Image (cartoon, rainbow, N blue to C red):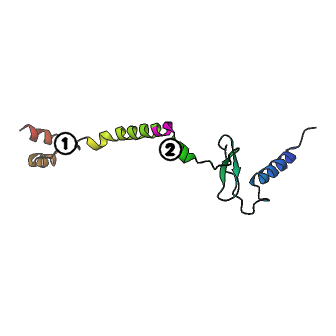
Amino acid sequence: MPTSNHQRQQRRATARHASVATDDVPDAVPRPPGRGPRNHFWDPRPPGVWRHNESNEPNQRRAARLTSARGRYAAAVRGRRWSRINAARCTAAPVLPRRWTSAEKTASLWGPDSAKIARAS
């Protein structure tokens, strides 16, 4: 016989409450959302870390990333990419507006075509 929607909701709620494991540890840290690292379990005791199943060592993602060659290579590529993107902005000569002569300033008061006439003379 299939279970009702209400029964499924109750089962999900009890599973959610059990995942925090507040009965064992009074100041338990809730499990973060999403998947954890491979071969690790969530330790709810403060400060709340992922621990390896066999060695019980805390998972140190930052340390593992820094020691791996792939992480170093990716960081170097990102650094080069951003430095090249901004290179044109840093080294290009600034575009300055052309200065108007006094004849052009005077001629521009008399109409749109008068500046061309003043420049030609």
**Residue 118 location, quadrant:** top left
- Decide which of 113, 93 is in the foreground and name it: 93
Residue drawn at x 36%, y 38% is: 85
Residue 80 falls left or right of residue 9: left
Magenta highlight on residue 86: no
Image quarter of the N terminus: top right
Q: Quadrant of residue 34?
A: top right
| Residue 92 x, y percent position in the rendering | 25, 40
Q: Read off the magenta span.
A: 68-72
Farthest right residue? 1
Label 2's element? helix
Label 2, residues with CA under 10 Å away: few <14, some 14-19, many ≥20:
few
In the image, residue 106 sits, relative to residue 85, either above or below, namely below
Picture quarter with the C terminus: top left
Q: Are marks 2 and 1 in contact (CB under 8 Å)?
A: no
Label 1 sits on residue: 112
- Is 103 or 99 nearer to us in this picture? 99
- Residues at marks 2 and 1, CA–CA distance in whole angstroms: 64 Å
Q: Earlier in the sequence, mark 2 or mark 1?
A: 2
Disc 1, SS: loop
- In the image, 7 versus 102, the foreground residue is 7
Q: Considering the whole magenta stretch, tell me its main secondary structure.
A: helix
Residue 100 in the image: state x and y as whole percent.
14, 46
